[in-house]
Image: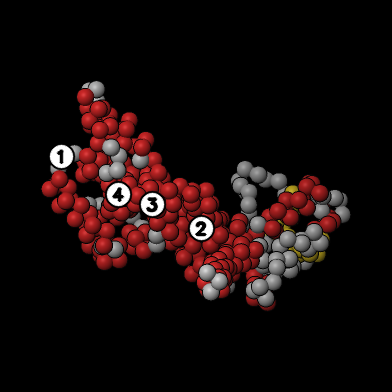
Amino acid sequence: MKTDAPKRIAGKTIAYIVLISWTLITVLPLIWMGYSSFKSNEELITDIYALPKALLDNKNDEYVVIKPQLNVIPDYDIDKDLRERIIIESATISPERRLMVHFLLKEDLSAELQQVQPGDHILVSQLPKQMQREIHWKTVFFNYRSAIIRGGLGRKFINSLIYSITATFMVNLFALMAAFAMSKMQFKRLALIVGGIIGVGYLISINSLIIPLFLLLTKVGLTDTHLGIILVYTAFGLPLAVMLDTQFISGIPLSLVESARIDGAGTFKILMAIIIPMATPVVVTVSILTALGIWNEFLLVLVLASSEATKSLPVGVFSFSSLTSTQLGWQLAALVVATLPVMIVYFIFQKRLAEGVVGGAIKG
């Protein structure tokens, strides 16, 4: 027994070292991406590992008064709001690039500041308190505002939500129906054939079918449409969902189904009242796997969606990064916008995910 103790200690030590190392390799890049998204482009170029300062500590930032120009886009409706404004640009964050620009209502400024001319310098601390707060928060979230507004990520975020929620619902509905029929109805030979076909479908990747899919959807007029993309996502999500659901539902006692039939319940009633409530763990598991897979999917939308109205968030982040290769802070903010929802969903449902997978394996 004594001779085994050093071996156990050594084994545990190695296991902990491996787990801690893997955790650091996974978590540290996410932490770096998070705090670096609040750094200015100049800070990222100078020292990519330093903590953010320029965008957060902005109370005494210096601004330059500039003339109205074509590349300076107002943040208000110039047709409806005719009040006079003074345009200022940051002298420290992306100077002379017309990126960090604010429009100050002239009537809200002191008499002295109302007399400033293009080329004059203003400190944030000289402005009214309300303007200081507005400029402070706009500066702190400068990268995020630029990524969402200039990159159009807000619309693409909504598209990703539409694809993920709708396709996940359809995958769950059709998979539960198929799994119920294969495991609880008297179609044993047919179930084996269908199960084999579904198994083959699971082995086929999107990459291998992307060209035939594009040609097929073009013929039926579903390219560059939300419906076409949702249908393809549903088709590719079904094989894994059917296999997991079948494995789980096969463990539900057949006597429950037979008792419900004796009481006069139809097939649909049995599915809705008995099978789905009891299969909640595997439904949650399938939902998480499907939704996260669709949220992170890139190639399909890149090929099938040609307009900005149908592109998803990963494609939007890629396109935005290609167009703004010199603005590293904007790219990191866009990545955080795309990554954060996935992390939140996983942390909330990680226990249910494990329960569904393990529960299905035990019942199978």
Mark 4 or mark 1: whose residue is earlier in sequence: 1
- Amino acid residing under circle 1: Gln
Label 2 sits on residue: 338
Q: Nearer the viewer, mark 4 or mark 3?
A: 4
Instruction: From the top left corner, tell me how far across and down residue 115 is, in percent.
Output: 83, 56
- Amino acid residing under circle 2: Ala
**Residue 44: quadrant of the picture:** bottom right
Instruction: From the top left corner, tell me how far across and down residue 277 is, in percent.
Output: 37, 35
Q: Nearer the viewer, mark 4 or mark 1?
A: 4
**Residue 139: quadrant of the picture:** bottom right
Q: Is residue 353 left or right of residue 51?
A: left
- Amino acid residing under circle 3: Val
Frontmost residue, 279 versus 15: 15
Residue 364 shows which numbered tag? 4
Q: CA distance from mark 4 to mark 3?
A: 11 Å
Q: CA distance from mark 4 to mark 1?
A: 18 Å
Label 3 sits on residue: 357
Label 1 sits on residue: 186
Mark 3 or mark 1: whose residue is earlier in sequence: 1
For the point 24% across and 22% down, which residue is it?
Answer: 263
Examine the rendered structure and indicate whether residue 174 appears above or below residue 201: above
Q: CA distance from mark 3 to mark 2?
A: 26 Å
For the point 53% across and 74% down, which residue is it?
Answer: 3
